[in-house]
Amino acid sequence: MNELEEGLEVRLDFDKLGKIGRAGQQVVPVVLQDADSGEVLFIGYANDEAFRATLERGSAVLWSTSRNELWHKGATSGDVLDLVEVRVNCEQNSLLYRVRRATGGACHTKDPSGAARPGCYYRVVESGDRLRFAD
């Protein structure tokens, strides 16, 4: 079991943005939101190449800050996120991709049945150091 993704202990990475900066990656945060329900699916990052590819393909393309490469969501998992619209915030330093799931999943993790989770926010903070799985 991957303790970070399946565990019930809070282990937040407060240095994520610092790591991105130190690696010299020029990206903006991207909130991926289900266009119909309003549910936030996950947060990713886009550089100029990923942003342009998203617009061209009509589906979510991100920049993987951990693998340092372009990541077309669903290319290997089949869990493609079709683009409905792209919004930009007031300071033009983050994006909102309003998407529709082509399949049921959006998260790279699997639920106990082996299906891709519909979103990445599947745990609830119980206290400062404990989590529980959402209902």
Image (tube, helix red, strand yellow):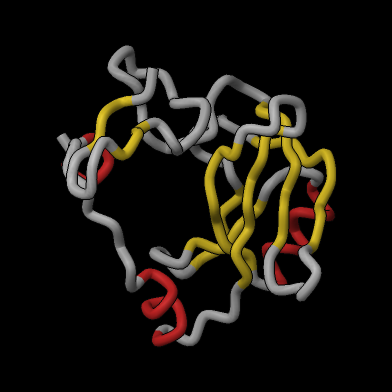
Q: Using residue 23 as the reference point, say whether residue 51 is left or right of it.
A: right
Looking at the figure, which quarter contains the C terminus? top left
Instruction: Give the percent coordinates (x, y) of residue 41.
Output: 56, 38
Q: Is residue 66 above or below residue 113?
A: below
User: How many badges with numbers are in the image?
Assistant: 0
Q: Nearer the viewer, residue 44 or 82?
A: 44
Residue at figure coordinates x 51%, y 66% from the top left: 69
Q: Nearer the viewer, residue 117 or 88?
A: 88
Q: Nearer the viewer, residue 79 or 106?
A: 106
Residue at figure coordinates x 79%, y 48% from the top left: 57
Residue at figure coordinates x 37%, y 34% from the top left: 109
Q: Using residue 98 as the reference point, say whether residue 56 is left or right of it.
A: right
Q: Residue 7's image quarter?
A: top left
Q: Using residue 89 as the reference point, say whether residue 68 is left or right of it.
A: left
Q: Residue 113's image quarter?
A: top left
Residue at the top extreme, as displayed = 113
Instruction: Give the percent coordinates (x, y) of residue 36.
Output: 76, 26
Looking at the figure, which quarter contains the N terminus? top left
Q: Nearer the viewer, residue 1 or 126?
A: 126
Residue at the front extreme, as displayed = 127
Residue at figure coordinates x 77%, y 64% from the top left: 89
Q: Using residue 77 as the reference point, say whether residue 8 is left or right of it.
A: left
Instruction: Give the percent coordinates (x, y) of residue 14.
Output: 33, 68
Q: Is residue 28 above or below residue 116?
A: below
Q: Is residue 16 above or below residue 35?
A: below
Instruction: Give the percent coordinates (x, y) of residue 38.
Output: 69, 33
